Image (cartoon, rainbow, N blue to C red):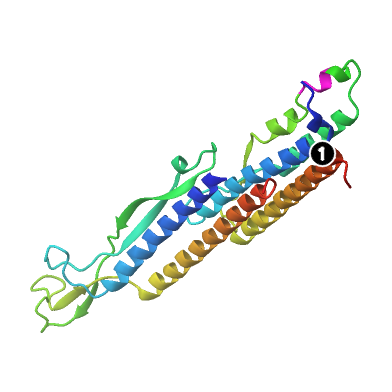
Amino acid sequence: MLNIFNQTALPALEQSAIFAQRRHNVLAGNMANIDTPGYQARDLSTDEFQTALSEAIEATRNPSPGYSSGDAADIDPMDGPRRAMENLLYHDGSEINLERQVTEIAKNQNLHNTAIALMKNQFETLRVAISERV
Amino acid sequence: MISALDISTSALVAQRVRLNTISGNIANMSSLKDENGNATPYKGRSVVFQTDESVSTNPGVSGVKVDSIEISDAEPIYRYQPQHPLAIKEGKYQGYVAYPNIDMTTQMVDALEATRSYEANIGVMEITKNLGRESLSIIA
């Protein structure tokens, strides 16, 4: 079935928002365990996710040969980033640094809210296009 | 997203238990008899935290819970008070009274740490609520 949203930035933005929410859960777990002895801080790998996301975006822009555009609608373009979110990273240090955790949470919140704002913008653009009233 | 609230709540509950044990320690700093009326001085309590997988729905993310409340077995402090009704009658500590070995400074610093952790987790809950609100604003 033709998915018109695949042509927009929405799948990538959706994956960014989901990644930010998952990462927030992991970081909240770190904060909860700040006084637990022997606890190792955990995180989701932002680099891995971003690599997978940019590869997925490139793939939708330049489909590889032997891949007709009729198929493009069926294949989930965001499969790579979805799989990149599965892996939990463990840091080596045994001490959780409160300041570092707080900063990571704030940066993550920023990423999430930016993705959401862009999604709203994208929907607004579609709405304008549908209503044909600028 | 909802599970992040549960995780932070588990931390709030654990820190409150810690604060309660500290209050109990400070309240009993001069208790010479235990709850059964025996003449043994109060022994300090401390909490042991443990990660708790059951609070969260994501695998690998965990909250915290109080595993146990340990009773300290430190030696009591002995003060020489031969006239005191609970003075030890014979042995090495004859004429001494056994007082609880609880250091107020240590307890207060522990209470400060518990407060800081409590506030940190409240901060995380505010951010969780903010993320949820932002996500909802897409449709509303």
Q: Which residues are magenta?
A: A71-75
Left or right? Give the position of B81 relative to A12.
Answer: left
The kind of residue tagged 1 is Ala
Q: Is residue B107 left or right of residue B97?
A: right
| Protein chain holding label 1 | A
Residue at 67% of width from left, 41% of height from top? A18
Q: Tell me which residue sits at (44%, 71%) in the image.
A: B109
Foreground of the two, A74 or A134: A134
The answer to whether residue B20 is above or below residue B68 is: below
Q: Does residue A116 sit above or below B87 in this rendering?
A: above
Membership of A73 in magenta stretch? yes
Judge from the rendering whether residue B87 lies leftward or rightward of residue A69; answer left or right.
left
Name the secondary structure under disc 1. loop
Q: Residue furthest bottom?
A: B83
- Residue A25 % position (x, y): 58, 46
Is residue A39 in view? yes
Query: How would you classify the magenta stretch by its main secondary structure?
Result: loop
Quadrant for the N terminus of chain A, please: top right
Residue B77: x %, y % from top left: 25, 73
In depth, the one of A47 and A2 nearer the eye is: A2
Whole-percent x and y of residue B95? Answer: 13, 78
Q: Residue B119, how many percent across, how many down?
A: 52, 64
Q: Which residue is mark 1?
A: A9
Residue A33 seen in render: no
